[in-house]
Amino acid sequence: MIKKVILITAIVWSCINTASINAQQAATTAQKTIALQHGAHGVGRRRDAAMEKWRAYGLGQFVHWGLYSIPAGEWNGKQYNGAAEWIKSWKEVPATTYDSLMYQFNPTKFNAESWAATAKQMGVKYVTITTKHHDGFCLWPSKYTNFTVANSPYKKDIIGPLVKAYDRRGIDVILYFSIMDWHNPDWRYDIKTREDSVAFDRFKQFTRNQLLELLTLYPAAKGLWFDGTWDKSWVKQAAFADSLEKEMRAMRPGLIIGSRFRADEYGKRHFDSNGNMMGDYEQGWERKIPEKITDVHGNDWDCVMTVPENQWGYSKIWKGHIKTTDELLEMLAKCVSLDGNFVLNFGPKPDGTLRTEELDLAKGIGAWMDTNSEAIYNGEYAGLVKQDWGYYVKKTGTNKIYMLVFNVPVSGALNVVLPSRTAISKVYDLGGPGLSYVPEEIGTSTYFIHLKQQTFKRPFVLVLETADNSKNSGAQYQKAKT
């Protein structure tokens, strides 16, 4: 009987969360006033197996690697103040000189298996890998340009071994691709003349060829992560980009594409002119995290985060604040608590190795995940009022709620407020299931969980199991009359 009650409670909570999301989506749909040919392909979350898996990842890795790792944020002794992978755009750097870095690209210490092993130990479930950044250099031997790894001293494909190594360890691969291409002479920031239009038509075909090539060469890849799509030239290509997206999805059923790929015919990006997301998840949360569940409007999303403030590719010098393991774990907890995934960036060195600081962070995160990953994988918004001690995460399809504790109050008492007619049936420490707690009821569906110690070296997780309390609800406490 208790199991039935618990199951019913879990189903009710799931229905409440789903109803809330559906209500948000319905409100958006009701506001539609514009007939669009190239807007969103659908409204609401995808519910196929591929997207359900993406939704459950929790923790991911991003890898930014290319020619820009060679100058590493410096040029002729001068420090570039922007992100290292943008250095070619700096006035100090001649374009042809930068492109000649291809003849220095020889990462003799690159080992795809080692990278994948680090990611596995860290606990990531998916990885996004740069196939080509804005500089146009391809880490695969594309037949549509000579500016590839095949013409470097290294000569060998980079992407193929990475896809295989990560896939072998059960880590899904997403391929990063920059539409903007500084190397291609047909790229334009805007289209102002007939000559621009003719050139950009050639560029569009080049882009299509490369994307279909990637999907053909690496069938194990689960999705595409687009960048460099904000310039007017590409924003004006609503019909072409929409057609290309449909072609890629037909070629690879289940392909996952974020909201950054294209604009509608009115130039709206991420969300079309009716407010509906264009793509399978929102890519607008770069180096930032929503504050509340309503900020994501019922959409899937992920946050990609750098360790310093803004360094993606390898830079010799990390400026400013360097995030710690505990800071990154709290970002992870916050993302999952708000129905998102958290993705941490790595910028490998030119020799193909990962920097020591990144390896140390991966080790620290992995050690925490070894104990607490149950609170991250398949986690979702719990529908509870956030408390100052940390974050709630609900395990999808269960009555389990995880309390990810980052700030222990001086009293040692963690406040928990549950929906009315809901009680706590069990509380225990995820890191030590033998350590259980007896909650103190302090109001209707409101409790204190008194910790048995108050000094903690790392964030920790408590597990709540809930049960229906409708028979006793409201009988014990009288509300104040004001």
Image (cartoon, rainbow, N blue to C red):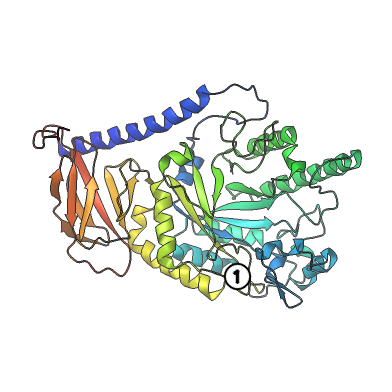
Q: Residue 62's quadrant in the figure?
A: bottom right
Query: Who is closer to the viewer here, 378 or 196?
Result: 196
The answer to whether residue 378 is seen in the rendering is no
Q: Position of residue 130 (x, y in %)?
A: 65, 57
The residue under label 1 is 111
Query: Who is closer to the viewer here, 480 or 7?
Result: 480
Q: Position of residue 256 (x, y in %)?
A: 57, 43
At x 51% / y 42%, what residue is drawn?
50
- 90 relative to 49 in the view: left or right: right
- 394 relative to 69 in the view: left or right: left
Residue that extends furthest to the right in the rendered view of this protein: 195
Is 230 located above or below residue 37 in the figure?
A: below
Residue that extends furthest to the front in the rendered view of this protein: 482
At x 56% / y 46%, what residue is drawn?
284
The answer to whether residue 285 is seen in the rendering is yes
Q: Position of residue 359 (x, y in %)?
A: 50, 71
Is 200 located above or below residue 31 in the figure?
A: below
Q: Position of residue 275 (x, y in %)?
A: 56, 31
Type of the residue with mark 1:
Asn
